[in-house]
Amino acid sequence: MEEQKVKLLKAFGEWSASTLFREWISRRRWFPRGWEATVEIADHLLLEALGDDVSAIVFLRAEDEEFQLPILISKDKPKVGESTPFVVDGDEAFFQEGELSEAYCSSLLGLMARGAKAKTSRGRPIAFRGPGLTILSPPRPVTLGKSSNVSVIIEAAPETVLLKSLRKVEKASREPLMLGLLSEQGYEHAPRLLGSVKTHDDTYLAEVLRYEASEGDLGGTIMARLSEEVEREAAHQPWKILGKLGEGLAQLHRALGASDHPRFAPQTLTGSQLEGQIRRGIGYYENSRQLLAEADPLVTEVADLLVSRERPIRNGLERLRGAEGWPSIHIHDDLHLEQVLVSEGEPFFVDFEGEPIRPSAERWVRNSPLRDVATMLRSLSYVKHAVLRHALGLEARQHELRLAKGEPPGELLTRLGSWEVLQRKTLLDAYLKALRASAPELLPREDAEVPGLILAWELEKALYELNYEALYRPENVLIPFCALPRNS
């Protein structure tokens, strides 16, 4: 039986060099666009599994980066989830991403429960740790606002869990340590880490988190409500849920800033750190300009417009220097509405890994809590555009393009802009009031300093978004572009 499994895995390895596999991986949300030509299998770990099926963690290399691909290979087509056929000695076999398979998840959780240790085919030590769980039903895929991971909900005994595979293999994994800090501080509105799979150098491959039942993410909740208001042409009022979000974010920052451990203790922003943020924003701008210039005709017009924005963009980023000496802590660092669940009417924050396209070491650099506020405000802009596109379809692009050029954008986008201004104020006022009351040491002394610096961090985030959309979703580049300054 083991010989047959090795044979299947070897055949999969040979097939992974084919054009069909490269086409398959190019469609994965977690794999960088354009890297498929260089992808190859570098290592693997064969997991224990019942029957003839193969459960394995395959390690891929592409462009000097490493990714993990959990897989299940079987001779019969799986009954649940997407699967892809390939040929073994003239016969058909099937593979699918492992997390979609009950067999793979059972194997992984079994190794965790035993605290097992193993080595890959090239001798890399892997450690499994976690509670004893029994799977009760097939895993259910779930999206938690991040395209760089694959997550599934597993109905298990004694409790339901979330299994998250971190597709990009990076040292100094951030989320497990951040969740540990929040747990120590008694903070209850973030996931509890129950188990993990990691390498000998504390590089995490997978996490098992306590699953929090929710009514969905805040992005979907707000979009549905705003769409309904637009349909009814209702007058906009401050939304209580955004006031609660502001208060909840303040509580999160209070917990993140309360530790005196050297790894987490608050510091102050230095001139060199802010210089790094400015350079990073300029780098996003330059990368985006190059990517858009090489894109299809639908977005090359945006590339031409982007050239004319260079001076106001650079001037806007320079305002970040005004935050020198401000308090800094380890913040969420990639906060948006889809990473906030609504649980019993309260915000519940998830995904503490930081921005996915930034190197792991950069995600450990402290920053002002107001940077999280800025990224959340940017998320409201995404909701505005999503509602516009839902209402107008393809016609929405013309409205967005007029807005990007500084021309009147049309009645609906104007109304949505008014909604955004009102809800921004609702969120920011609630946040500042709550943090001034609970942890005033994390804010600058004067509220008057706050708006200008938040705008500068919003600009840096919008440039990150522009770079991300140009790389992965070019059809969305107008959304962050509309937030870029037109005048110096």
Image (cartoon, rainbow, N blue to C red):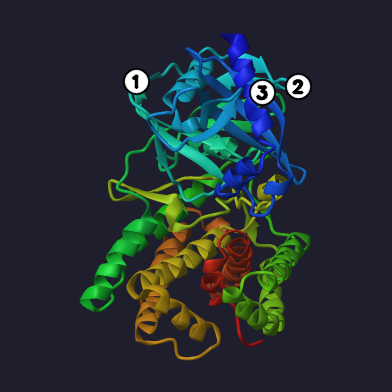
Mark 2 or 1, which is nearer the eye?
2
Badge 2 marks a residue whose secondary structure is loop
- Contact between labelled residues 3 and 1, with CB atoms less than 8 Å apart: no
Where is residue 27? Give x, y as percent.
55, 49
Q: Which mark is residue 157?
A: 1
Measured Cα–Cα span from mark 2 to mark 1: 35 Å
The single residue placed furthest to the bottom in the displayed view is 407
Left or right position of 403 against 68: left
Instruction: Count neighbours of disc 2 (C-alpha within 10 A) and say few if under 14, some if 14 to 19, many if 20 or more.
Output: few
Label located before the other in sequence (3 or 2): 3
Q: Quadrant of residue 450?
A: bottom right
Amino acid bearing label 1: Ala
Q: Residue at the spot x=50%, y=91% of the render?
A: 407
Which amino acid, by three-letter code, is at mark 2? Arg
Residue count near mark 1 (Cα–Cα under 10 Å), binned few <14, some 14–19, many ≥20: few
Q: Name the residue nearer the viewer: 390 or 208.
A: 390
Which image quadrant for residue 426? bottom left
Q: Nearer the viewer, mark 1 or mark 3?
A: 3
Q: Secondary structure at mark 3?
A: helix
**Residue hosting label 2:** 122
* C-alpha separation, residue under disc 1 versus residue under disc 3: 35 Å
